[in-house]
Amino acid sequence: MINFNKPPFAGREKEYMVQAIDSNKICGDGPFTKKCNGWIEKNTGTTKALLTTSCTQALEMAALLSDIKPGDEVILPSFTFVSTANAFVLRGAKLVFVDIRPDTKNIDEALIEEAITDKTKVIAPVHYAGVGCEMDTIMDIAGRHNLIVVEDAAQGVMASYKGRALGSIGDFGCFSFHETKNYSMGEGGAILIKDADKAEEAEIIREKGTDRSRFLRGQVDKYSWVSLGSSYLPSDMNAAYLLAQLEEADTINEARLASWHGYYEALEPLQEKGIIELPVIPEECKHNAHMFYIMTNDIEERGRLIKHLRDNDVQAVFHYVPLHSAKAGKEYGRFHGEDKYTTDISSRLLRLPMYYGLSSEDVEKVTDAVRAFYL
Ligand SMILES: *Cc1c(COP(=O)(O)O)cnc(C)c1O
């Protein structure tokens, strides 16, 4: 069976985890966490990066840092994972969903401005499949309306828009290091913070609302409760696992891109015949091969293709149930404008196996099975 996903493993994970254990310092913010934070800062150009226990929690931190109050509105796509929405709803926000673009499946930047009301506080673009949203337009809208931009860059590590790393463009960026993402620590994530003033606030929120980070740096002689917060920092053992992969990020990225291009080239003839559609990467975006998906013609055809692939030992999956159509989505949000693409795309999109270590033979086996289905 060719699995849809396998957690990434670069080679030195066990060695680093043993080092973390032997150092008798396995709680948060140890040497491996600091190295991972440093790697993110260096490789994205962000002012401050802090590892978190998940992207979900990085998004929750971003909602706290955005000072979301009950009734504030957040503009986001409906075609995303629940965490993009939950983080803001937990602080009392109302969700305003807008449609996505048919090419990148990202939020349609041309529809954002008309969804803004006097309650809007945040725009939360999601870089689907590690392909950047149209960030110049989004930042321009945010600037003119005095809004905060929280990038859900869960899928966007090592990807960029006009040369700028995804996650480093908005006020806050959120990475995921879940086992299904390009780089992993089992469960984990990071928050990227552009504004230096917000960086200290973020440290406090992440350390249960205390100024413990300042205390550990010797800047204050005791630490105490200074604001609302929670525990958002991961164990240094998990960070040790992650560091091994970040050190090999170029190798992992190139291997994934090779698989991605293998898929694209083998399936391009089907696209040329008008049978399926393949991903579109705008010229200003450098993606990270987080995902390879194809667009089938309808939900029924997709179901048959999944079964055909399963019969050929290939696991293919789909997502997302549009948030605005889900029980909680209806309760906490509304869809602004017409749902021209969100529901349609979510019913036709199919993801093929993609992970570090997928061989060119595996890619060939998958694409042969897809071709056999259609030809
Ligand atoms: C994976 C993912 C998340 C959640 O990441 P966790 O680290 O599992 O919390 C959030 N948003 C998007 C778009 C994702 O793909």
Image (tube, grey):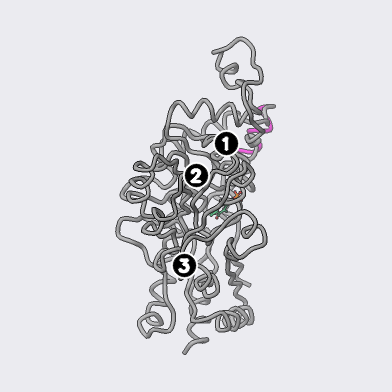
Give how far across and how far down residue 13 sits, in percent. Answer: 60, 44
Q: Nearer the viewer, mark 1 or mark 3?
A: 3
User: N-terminal of the two: label 2 or label 3?
Assistant: 2
What stretch of residues is rendered in magenta?
Answer: 16-23
> Quarter-wise, where is residue 67 in the image?
top right
The residue tagged 3 is 338
> Quarter-wise, where is residue 115 in the image?
bottom left
**Helix, strand or loop at disc 3?**
loop
Q: Is residue 309 highlighted in magenta? A: no
Give how far across and how far down residue 273 sits, in percent. Answer: 37, 85
Q: Which mark is residue 64?
A: 1
The residue tagged 2 is 119
Residues tagged 1 and 2 counted as in contact (Cβ below 8 A):
no
Examine the rendered structure and indicate whether residue 287 appears above or below residue 278: above
Asked whether mark 3 lies closer than 8 Å to ligand 1, one says no
Identify residue type, mark 2: Lys
Identify residue type, mark 1: Leu
Disc 1 from disc 2: Cα separation: 17 Å
Mark 2, residues whose alpha carbon is within 10 Å: few (<14), some, or many (≥20)? few
**Helix, strand or loop at disc 2?**
loop
Give how far across and how far down residue 160 sits, in percent. Answer: 37, 50
Asked whether mark 1 lies closer than 8 Å to ligand 1, one says no
Q: Is residue 18 highlighted in magenta? A: yes
Residues tagged 2 and 3 counted as in contact (Cβ below 8 A):
no
Magenta segment's dominant SS is: helix
Identify residue type, mark 3: Glu
Examine the rendered structure and indicate whether residue 89 appears above or below residue 109: above
Residue appearing at x 43%, y 27% in the figure: 196
Q: Is residue 121 visible?
A: yes
